[in-house]
């Protein structure tokens, strides 16, 4: 868990699209970096102003439908990725279907546990258990 955060951020592969409240596309095919119960982080070529309200769509193999909701941009940081200028954008969810985000986070946790158990069986580092649950 990252210090100062209320919820664990999970690294996950996926894509993110942002639209303005009027429906104008702001980000198309942003790269999902991580996600938590309260927000997500993505990398994109487009610079977005802090405070911008966006409608978002998240696609990942760990969810059988598109995760949709409304968010506000809280952080924007320029990063260099392979010589390309990109922006790392952090958003806080304003509205999202709670069942959908919980289902996605549960799938991420199960995937982590399966990978750790498989690694443990092959002799690599042991799974950390807290209250009989897998943890990072």
Image: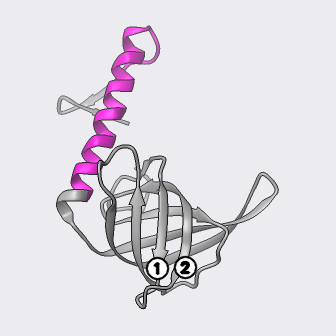
Q: Percent x, y for residue 90?
A: 50, 69
Dot placed on the residue nearer the N-terminal end, 1 or 2? 1
Q: Which mark identifies residue 19? A: 1
Q: Percent x, y for residue 79?
A: 70, 63
Q: How is the image coloured?
A: one colour
User: Mark 1 touching mark 2, by CB under 8 A?
Assistant: yes
Q: Quadrant of the C terminus?
A: top left
Q: Which mark identifies residue 26? A: 2
Circle 1 Cα neighbour tier, 10 Å, few/some/many (<14 / 14–19 / ≥20): some
Q: Is the residue 83 above or below the residue 52 in the image?
A: above
Q: Percent x, y for residue 133?
A: 22, 32
Q: Residue at x 55, y 73 (%)?
A: 27
Taking depth in this image into account, of 60 and 120 the one nearest to the observer is 60
Q: Is the residue 6 above or below the residue 124 in the image?
A: below
Q: Which residues are magenta?
A: 101-127
Q: Is the residue 69 above or below the residue 131 in the image?
A: below
Circle 2 Cα neighbour tier, 10 Å, few/some/many (<14 / 14–19 / ≥20): some
Residue 104 falls within the magenta-colored stretch: yes
Q: Residue at x 55, y 79 (%)?
A: 26
């Amino acid at each position: 868990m990252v210090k100062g955060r209320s919820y664990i951020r999970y690294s996950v592969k996926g894509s993110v699209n942002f639209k303005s409240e009027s429906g104008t596309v702001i980000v198309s095919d942003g790269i999902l970096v991580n996600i938590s119960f309260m927000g997500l982080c993505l990398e994109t070529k487009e610079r977005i102003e802090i405070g911008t309200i966006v409608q978002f769509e998240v696609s990942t193999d760990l969810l059988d439908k598109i995760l949709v909701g409304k968010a506000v941009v809280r952080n924007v940081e320029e990063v260099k990725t392979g010589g390309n200028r990109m922006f790392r954008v952090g958003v806080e969810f304003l509205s999202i279907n709670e069942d959908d985000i919980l289902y996605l986070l549960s799938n991420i946790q199960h995937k982590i546990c399966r990978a750790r158990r498989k690694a443990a069986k092959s002799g690599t580092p042991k799974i950390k258990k807290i209250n009989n649950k897998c943890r990072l």
